[in-house]
Amino acid sequence: MTFDLEHFRLKSLDLGQLTGASMALHAIPDAYFLKHTGVGCKHKTVTQFGTHDWAKGVAAHEGWTEVGDAALIRGSGRRVGPYARSAYQRHKPSILAISSVTFLDLTGDDLPDVVAGLDAELPCEVMLLKVPGFEGDLYSGYLTTLVEVCRRMDWSVAPDRAQEVAVLGYLWDRYEGDHQGNQLQLKALLQAIGLSLGPVLFSGTPYTALRDAPRSKTVLCLPYAEPKRKTLQRVCKRDLVSVDLPIGRRFTSQFLRVVASAAGVAGATVEGLIARQETALGERLGTMVDHLRGQSVAVFADLPLLAGTMATLEELGIRVVIAGIRGRTLGKAADLEAALARVGAAVPAGCQVVDQPSLARVRALCADAIAAGTLDGVLGSATDLNALGTLPASTPLRRSAGTASRTTGPFKLEIGFPCRDHHCAYAMPFMGYMGVSIFVQRLLTAPRLWDTGVATRV
């Protein structure tokens, strides 16, 4: 008898809701996160940010109640108040979020009542986040925080900014040039069709500015918010506009069409802009993409990022042979196929689509593809790429496409969360038409990092 151990293995993305909540609150610079946790639990949820976000540390905006044995026996809920008051006095946040962990929830302390009392007492807004560790993942924790932040806003006001577009569900995971560049791209795309970018939840924007989101006439729901779209519509009292991430030429053009239609912008205006932008993009890249055509790669990413990346790779003539969907909240293989179909793309024939792969499976899939001579590169998070570092030295290498005499290993390109080596000191968007150019540049550069150093004939 054989047993499949895949279910029990450490996954490519095994981060829990608490990490997602931490990520979301890190993206609100005037927020503070108080974790009601035991001694020794506090660092595990934020350790990835130390290597992922070089621009701004997350630990300075978080605190922990550090419940020990004695406090657990006496009742740990009484520790929350003093820590919350101290956090407010030291940091003066506009919004203070408090979460708990499962073993403390099971003691029976009435934490919701404690938080409600602090909300009435402190000058800032205080909210409770329910992000238990026994269910969900990073994305559900991020989404829970989004919903609770939206609940604190006054959606009864009239949306008096007719040309403004607010955004719900932007996954801001670091204060570096990729996300800052994405915000510039979103702003430029909207301005080109006569609209303006309003508050983006979340985008490194202070909560005091995010509270103006209800004044925007059009409110977009990005894929990271889609699982709670009905809840958000009830909270916001608005019809939210669902739209895919503007990654790659086709998804960016679709983004413009969907937003323009929702905001009442004339179709001819949008189609003219799209035609000009796509023509300029083709001229800018020119024959550079010819150096990429024909390559085969594996991609591991959350579903929205995976869909955008796969569509872009298809546009560049690069074949995806392995597609790993990270996380459990955002969708599975059928959802990936549906997302690609919305822009006329598709999962390539023969491509292995894997839901929530373990690190062991990431390693095995790539090793098999390398041995079969069908893998030129791997795109994934630092976690995924790190798993490939344990492949034995005897693993067969693939001859690089377009080279007659050089044999190298598959190139590696970091995307998603977390990244260890890819950092952006200036605007390097992966969204919008400019994001395609940046992506092509990264693809052209990546193989050079894995050159074996063997002399070649030029």
Image (cartoon, rainbow, N blue to C red):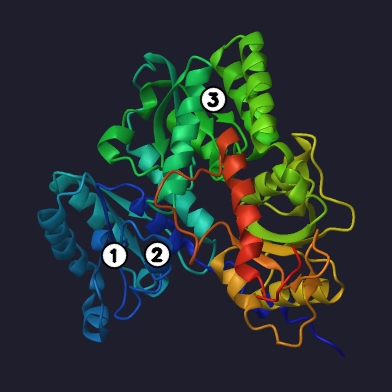
Position of residue 159 measured from the top left corner of the image (x, y, whole percent): 39, 17
Determine which residue is flagged by label 1.
Answer: 59
Give the label on residue 239, or none: 3
Q: Secondary structure at mark 2?
A: helix
Position of residue 75 measured from the top left corner of the image (x, y, whole percent): 24, 75
Determine which residue is flagged by label 2.
Answer: 49
Q: State the residue in front, 323 or 242.
A: 323
Q: Residues within 10 Å of mark 2 (few under 14, many from 20)?
A: many
Check whether the beta carbons of the residues at disc 1 and disc 2 lie within 8 A of each other.
yes
Amino acid type assigned to the residue bearing label 1 in the image:
Ala
Above or below — where is 72 with respect to 58? below
Q: Quadrant of residue 44?
A: bottom left
Amino acid type assigned to the residue bearing label 3 in the image:
Asp
> Residue farthest to the front?
458
Give the label on residue 85, or none: none
Earlier residue among tags 2 and 3: 2
Q: State the residue in front, 34 or 156.
A: 34
Q: Which residue is at a point 19% across and 51% down the rendered structure image?
A: 117
